Image (spheres, rainbow, N blue to C red):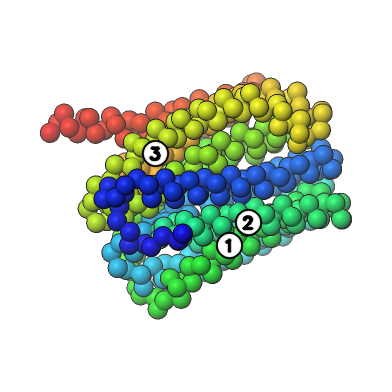
Amino acid sequence: MAESPNLPTVDHKPHAAFFRQSGWLMLANIGAGALTWGVHFLAKSIPKSEYAAFGTLLMVVACLPAMPLQMVFAQQSAQALATGRERQLSGMIRLAWLWTFIVWALGALAVFCFQDKIIAGWHLPNGLGLWATVLAVLASLWLPLFIGVLQGRQDFFWMGWAQIFAGAGRFVVAAALVFALTAGAAGMMAGAFLGVGFGAAIAIWRSRDLWLASPEKFDWRGFLRQVLPLTFGFGACQFMFTSDTMFAKAYFTDEEMAPYVAAGTLSRALLWLVLPLAAVMFPKIVHASAKAEKSNLFNLVVLGTAALAVCGGLGLWLVGPVMVKLVYTSNYVAATTALLPWYAAAMVPLALANVMVNDLLARGRFGVVPWMVALAAGYGFTLPRMLDHFHSREVVLQTLGGFNLLLFGICAWFVWGVKRRSASKA
């Protein structure tokens, strides 16, 4: 089921391949997401303070530039394979692998120096969870790097299995440590480290023919001209997707944060449905652009994403309270259910904006990136000030939803408005 990197674009064959590949990734995402979400069943077996600590530590991992790293190597791999530059790609992979380790090592040293302040500031029970998170950070840097390589070569079969095994390993290890050793947040984060590390190992092994190839020098300036916009563009998307929990943690107690983390976990599951469509689309558009071929995938993907996101949001609104009762203790239910509609509504425009960002950046239309970065900075500036004046979890989600709508509007303008403007001038 693995795909050859030299397949023709979707425009030259039936759409069956696209639906097969995106369907498989959708199943893999749902399976991996369900296994990952299964960790939250353990909330019934640990104190609220431990679960709130787990939610905070998990957001540290979630705020890593995983999405930019994956998309950079998806783009570089697709482009290199389309133009016969595999040896240059080998050099890029090796260099990125080395530098991610160096940066992680410096970060681990900083955590060692400021360990006590971090534990006190985040109200952590002890340092074990913090150091399990440090290890999980390393695995979470390597997984997107090599998943991106698989995505770029359109090896969606093993890309999906790497994600599934990452989720399975995380759930099994976390459950074992919580029940056998009552490890709490530390055990759950240890599960995250080992599970993600297993998924990364699969992706590294599967892409070995590329990074073991004899490396060749590549154009640094050209590389940076492509990588920096991808990094900042997808980084802005990821910031909008993950940072609200870390902002909220500074303003709410552990008891208030636990339902917020629960609602966020359920609401972000919406993206399990829609991200595979953009993930399959991205390398195909990069491949088509590198060979000056046309691709009409975008319209298909944006319509599918809109339908799935809206239906998923409505389904979560209707079924979410039942899921909360199944997973969490009774004292979570009322607060989590009240937050779910706001959280789900905030995710829908972000899902649509994500598809547009994938299309724009795959085609090298980087003019949208400064606007996205400015919007993310504005969100990071505005949210704490809103919380200073309105100490409310709903305000966090209303602010997030408003900025996600603005992101959708900016991306829509660059996708459709700029085209119409250019056509009228011509």
x then y, percent, for residue 203: 53, 63
Instruction: Give percent across and percent down for residue 116.
Output: 77, 52
Please tell me how crowded label 1 is: few (under 14), some (14-19), or many (20+) other residues with Cα within 10 Å: many
Residue 228 location in percent, x, y?
A: 39, 52
| Label 1 SS | helix
N-term-proximal mark, 1 vs 2: 2
Residue at (70, 26) in percent of width and height: 321
Residue drawn at (51%, 67%) of the image: 206
Q: Nearer the viewer, residue 187 or 202?
A: 202
Q: Are marks 1 and 2 in contact (CB under 8 Å)?
A: yes
Q: Is residue 336 left or right of residue 297?
A: right
Q: Amino acid at mark 3?
A: Val
Mark 3 secondary-structure assignment: helix
Instruction: Give amino acid for label 2.
Output: Ala
Q: CA distance from mark 3 to mark 1?
A: 28 Å
Residue pointed to by mark 1: 200
Which mark, residue 166?
2
The location of residue 21, given as percent across then percent down, is 44, 50
Residue that protrudes farthest toward the bottom in the picture: 214
Which is nearer the N-term, disc 3 or disc 1? 1
Residue 11 seen in render = yes
Is residue 387 among the parts visible in the rendering? Answer: no
Q: Tell which of 212 and 421 is nearer to you.
A: 212
**Quadrant assignment, res 47:** top right
| 43 vs 128: above or below | above
- Label 3 sits on residue: 301
Please state which amino acid type lies under the numbered disc 1. Answer: Ala
